[in-house]
Image (cartoon, rainbow, N blue to C red):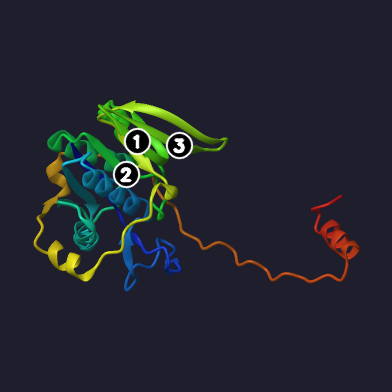
Amino acid sequence: MKILVGIKRVIDYNVRVQVNREGTGVVKDGVKMSINPFDEIAIEEALRMKESGAASEVVAVSIGPEAAQQQLRTALAMGADRALLFTSDDEIQPLTAARGLLAVVEKEDPGLVLLGKQAIDDDANQVGQMLAALWQRPQATFVSALEFNDGSAKATREVDAGLETIEVDLPAVITVDLRLNEPRFVKMPDIMKAKRKPLDIRPFAELGVELPPQLETGRYEPPPRRQGGVKVESVEALVAALKDKGILS
């Protein structure tokens, strides 16, 4: 079974994001970029499946700027067999990304598509669901545990009420959550080997997806600064302070 793993280039989660002066976006120049953490978990799960014999090939795919080669090389260093990059300097919105991935799926014919449940830059949580709908295949989202049988997958999902276990037929789209696994550490020899693995770079236009932006962002603003706390001497003083702020009546 071939596994297709979608990854996105995002600002590293350790970086403190800053809004640019114009309020039209966030500062990216000179900022460390990484694989979206949820997508890294998806890569790790695909690699574990291959190592267990449940999969024969792991293909990493990304849509974005040419600089995303760096993140795809990281996926190759982790153990992916090959990578595909469809380049575009435009903002790729969720529906456009889903249609682009559908074109890749139709060409690659994978038995499973693994994605992170969301990207940490826009937190949209939409691409996996849209891809499943367009592909007309089952989906399992927010997955924290996976088991595979002949032609199906049992997925444990994290939902508001707790945990839910469902079974889906393959091929399917699965989006993964943080508790599914812990991604492996990439060693220097693996990084060197990754340079010899195939990385196919093509323009996004080659996928034949023409879709005007569905969403328009008016302005970016940083959240208001948190005010410092106030120490009180007693419970009575705390209650009085909460009443003054209208929190208690």
Q: What amino acid is labelled 3 in the image?
A: Arg
* Element assignment for label 3: strand
State the image coordinates of residue 14 (x, y, percent, origin top left): 43, 67
In the rendered view, would you say 32 is above or below 56? Answer: below
Q: Position of residue 19 (x, y in %)?
A: 44, 66
Q: Does the CB distance between marks 1 and 3 fall below 8 Å? A: no
Residue furthest out toward the bottom: 30
Please tell me whether mark 1 or mark 3 is closer to you in this view: 1
Front: mark 2 or 1: 1
Image quadrant where residue 16 sits: bottom left
Question: 10 Å neighbourhood of mark 3: few (<14), some, or many (≥20)?
Answer: many
Report, in whole angstroms, how far the alpha carbon at label 3 lies from the one at label 2: 14 Å
Residue ID for mark 2: 115
Residue kind at label 1, given as amino acid type: Glu
Q: Which mark is residue 157?
A: 3
The answer to whether residue 247 of the structure is visible from this angle is: yes
Q: Quadrant of residue 12?
A: bottom left
Query: In 3D space, how far apart are the residues under numbered discs 2 and 1 (Cα atoms)?
Result: 16 Å
Q: Is the residue marked by circle 2 packed among few (<14), some (14-19), or many (20+) residues within 10 Å?
A: many
Query: x%, y% of residue 4?
Result: 22, 42
Q: Earlier in the sequence, mark 1 or mark 3?
A: 1
The answer to which of marks 3 and 2 sits earlier in the sequence is 2
Q: Count the marks.
A: 3
What residue is drawn where x is 40% and y is 47%?
A: 180
Q: Nearer the viewer, residue 244 or 111?
A: 111
Instruction: Label 1, secondary structure: give it.
Output: strand
**Mark 1 highlights which residue?**
147
In this view, 158 is above or below 248: above
Q: Looking at the picture, which amino acid does disc 2 mark?
A: Leu
Query: In the drawing, what numbered circle is on residue 90?
Result: none
Residue 79 coordinates in the image, percent (x, y): 20, 55
